[in-house]
């Protein structure tokens, strides 16, 4: 999947019914900026206030950073270290902390009193105890390696379909012209993504504008559908 893709944030947010899920794929008609991301989080916060719900979670995919320009990342005001190519080393800082600092500054600017706390979900997620599905799936993949090896197949990955049948996925079939395997991004036109983003999230929409004016003068600025 790759760090550029939003599958994990999308899956976690959808399963837990988070009011706001932010992944890079949702910005398929506009550029990714801190301002837009913060506006989406504030939109969900205001929607929850209108609904009388005093808590909530917004999950933001790490992948959004991979679609930002270096200039946009540096505009966050965070002091980064840099790699040999001059790019900010994102792995050395908490992305959740960056978003929370910018969010709190914006909330103070628009005079909306809501507390927020950053939580970084990292490698510890991979250390969770395996479920029965995980154990069975990994066993099938391990057996599949031997199965494909005995057939003399190489240059491929082992896959298991929903029935448990093993199939090879040849790298030449998924490589681009430079021999690189591109990440499989979340399909924003798929039914699942449309259901979650159109009906599962909570953010300001035209019918909320009047109620939202109790907190801000320009609620349309925080409407996800605007961009």
Image (cartoon, grey):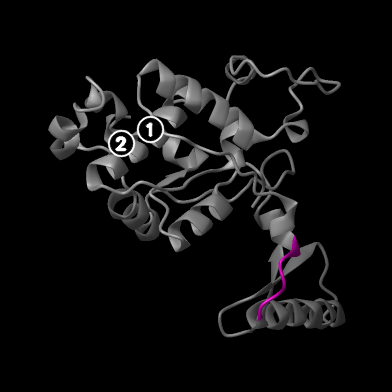
In this picture, which residue range is highlighted in magenta? 127-131
Of residues 27 and 162, the one nearer the viewer is: 27
Q: Is residue 95 rendered to the left or right of residue 52?
A: right
- Say which residue label 2 marks: 46
Residue 183, x across and y down, in percent: 63, 47
How far apart are the alpha carbons under marks 2 and 1? 6 Å
Q: Are marks 2 and 1 in contact (CB under 8 Å)?
A: yes
Q: Is residue 189 above or below residue 109?
A: below
Callout 2: few (<14), some (14-19), or many (20+) C-alpha neighbours within 10 Å? Answer: many
User: Which quarter of the figure has residue 154?
Assistant: bottom right
Q: Is residue 1 above or below residue 212?
A: below
Q: Label 1's element?
A: helix
Q: Is residue 109 above or below residue 107?
A: above
Q: Is residue 124 rendered to the left or right of residue 26?
A: right
Of residues 173 and 86, the one nearer the viewer is: 86
Q: Is residue 181 rendered to the left or right of residue 142?
A: left
Q: Main secondary structure of the magenta part?
A: loop
- Say which residue label 1 marks: 42
Of residues 96 and 2, the one nearer the viewer is: 96
Of residues 97 and 192, the one nearer the viewer is: 97
Query: In the image, what residue occupies the spot 28% across and 32% down?
Result: 223
Query: In the image, what residue occupies the spot 42% across and 20% down?
Result: 108
Q: Is residue 166 above or below residue 199?
A: below
Q: Label 2's element?
A: helix
Query: In the image, what residue occupies the spot 72% across and 17% down?
Result: 79
User: Which quarter of the figure has residue 227?
Assistant: top left
In the image, residue 141 lies in the stretch drawn in magenta: no
User: Which quarter of the figure has residue 110?
Assistant: top left
Residue 1, x across and y down, in percent: 64, 52
Query: In the image, what residue occupies the spot 42% across and 53% down?
Result: 18
Residue 185, x across and y down, in percent: 54, 48
């Amino acid at each position: 999947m790759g760090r550029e893709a939003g599958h994990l944030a999308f899956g976690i947010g959808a399963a837990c019914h988070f009011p706001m899920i932010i992944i890079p794929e949702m910005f398929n008609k506009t550029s990714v900026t801190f301002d837009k991301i913060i506006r989406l989080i504030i939109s969900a916060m205001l929607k929850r206030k209108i609904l009388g719900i005093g808590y909530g979670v917004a999950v933001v995919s790490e992948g959004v950073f991979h679609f930002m320009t270096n200039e946009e990342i540096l505009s966050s005001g965070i002091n980064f270290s840099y790699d040999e190519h001059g790019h900010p080393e994102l792995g050395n800082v908490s992305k959740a902390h960056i978003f929370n600092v910018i969010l709190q500054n914006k909330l103070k600017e628009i005079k909306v009193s809501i507390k927020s706390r950053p939580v970084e979900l990292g490698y510890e997620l991979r250390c969770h105890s395996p479920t029965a599905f995980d154990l069975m799936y990994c066993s099938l993949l391990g057996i599949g390696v031997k199965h494909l090896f005995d057939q003399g197949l190489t240059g491929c990955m082992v896959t298991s379909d929903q029935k448990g049948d093993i199939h090879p996925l040849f790298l030449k079939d998924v490589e681009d012209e430079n021999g690189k395997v591109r990440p499989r991004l979340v399909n924003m036109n798929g039914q699942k993504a449309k259901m979650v983003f159109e009906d599962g999230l909570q953010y300001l929409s035209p019918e909320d504008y009047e109620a939202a004016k109790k907190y801000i003068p320009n609620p349309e600025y925080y409407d996800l559908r605007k961009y």
